Image (cartoon, rainbow, N blue to C red):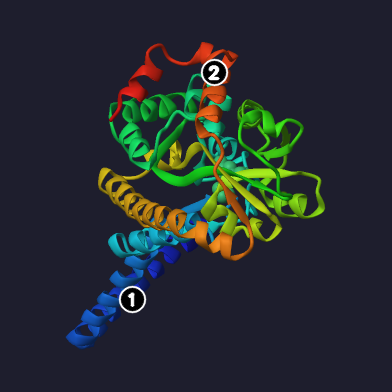
Amino acid sequence: MQLVSGRCGILLHRSHASAVQRHAGDSMLRFPAMARASMIGVFLLLALVAVSARAQTVLRISTPAVPDDWHVKMLYVFKDELAKTTPRRFDVQVHHSGTLFRQGAEAVAMQRGNLEMALLSMQDVARQLPEYSIFTAGYLIRDPGHLQKVYGGPIGGEVRSRIAEAMGIELLQVVYLGTRQLGLREPRKVSTPADLAGVKLRMPGSKEWLFLGQALGASATPLAFPEVYLGLKTGTIDAQDNPLPTLKSAKFYEVTKQIVLTGHLVDSLQLAIAEKTWQALSPAERAQVKTAAAQAAQFNDENRQREEKELIEFFRAQGIAVTTPDVDAFRKTVQAAYLKSEYAQKWPRGLLERINAVR
Ligand code: KDO
């Protein structure tokens, strides 16, 4: 019985299927050609949307910089540029003020696959590759032009390859941060490093930074960037060091009475991307990302250098004393401190001379 009824079932099923096919064939013939074409068009469009939505790469960029900082504005230039050249391919998300990752935690976050992009300092790099503490040394890079030539030439190429290989982080583009000067909460005569004895000089919280503060003759105190304003206001610190555009954007000038133009570090950051994210891009996409990074850097560098010239007058107009110390005395003391430090022991042989020789 079962076998018979089963056969019946199959027969019924087959005849039903052919009826369905006939019906479908008939209605396809009756369906107007225009409507069919537009249905196919809609399907293709939906498929395209689905594919492009799946292929979109999220690029979260973390920085401690505040919204008014050229670095944050620059990241929007990067985002807009990519949106123009590769529409909908990337979802660039700018996370400023250290809200996504705190200052100094970005490199490890990228290495663990928790972050795609950041603005890294060479101090961050030196924590993992001590030989590159050379790039944290005071009075090494002479000016923004020297900085561009060092990173834009063979030295920069070697550094980027080594960092990509050893850290799994690709440095896309060097960006100027500015030339670091001292900002004091109370006026003081500062001519040579000896005049900074006992001054609680805030530095970012890593030993490479603290060493620079000590080399300047001060009593270096670690403090995170977001706490500097309050530190100056309340007197938990006596001074901080940053370039003039940062004094303006982070409003440190409101709690500063004197700026001492030591010019002790021509500072920069590196717009960096996690190797895993980088390798997942096609060669054409990588070129587009690099071009967007270069345009963002140009926007940043021009604005910062212009502001560095204009801001001295602005600060004076705010009643801040802007003084020039014996820069040669600072240079000699700081350079000597680095040369006899444990850092210099680890610098790649001949690199100091090569950097100095870049003209
Ligand atoms: C700072 O904390 O003083 C510093 O200037 C250090 C830089 O390496 C960089 O992190 C910078 O802060 C931030 O981007 C804020 O400008």
Q: Residue at x 42, y 45 (%)?
A: 175
Seen in the picture, residue 238 relative to 15 is either above or below; the reply is above
- The amino acid on which the numbered mark 1 sits, given as a three-letter code, is Val
Q: Nearer the viewer, residue 284 or 264?
A: 264
* Mark number displayed over residue 336: 2
- The amino acid on which the numbered mark 2 sits, given as a three-letter code, is Ala
Seen in the picture, residue 91 relative to 217 is either above or below; the reply is below
Residue 66 shows in this picture: no
Rendered image quadrant of residue 319: bottom right
Q: What is the C-alpha distance between the residues marked 1 and 2?
A: 91 Å
Q: Give the image location of residue 108, x and y in percent.
A: 59, 35
Sequence-earlier tag: 1 or 2: 1
Q: Nearer the viewer, residue 18 or 245?
A: 245
* Mark number displayed over residue 20: 1
Q: Nearer the viewer, residue 147 or 105?
A: 147
Q: Residue at x 81, y 53 (%)?
A: 234
Seen in the picture, residue 352 relative to 24 is either above or below; the reply is above
Q: Quadrant of the C terminus?
A: top left
Q: Residue at x 26, y 75 (%)?
A: 40
Q: Give the image location of residue 331, x and y in percent.
A: 51, 28
Rendered image quadrant of residue 53: bottom left
- SS class of the residue under badge 1? helix
* Mark number displayed over residue 121: none
Rendered image quadrant of residue 342: top right
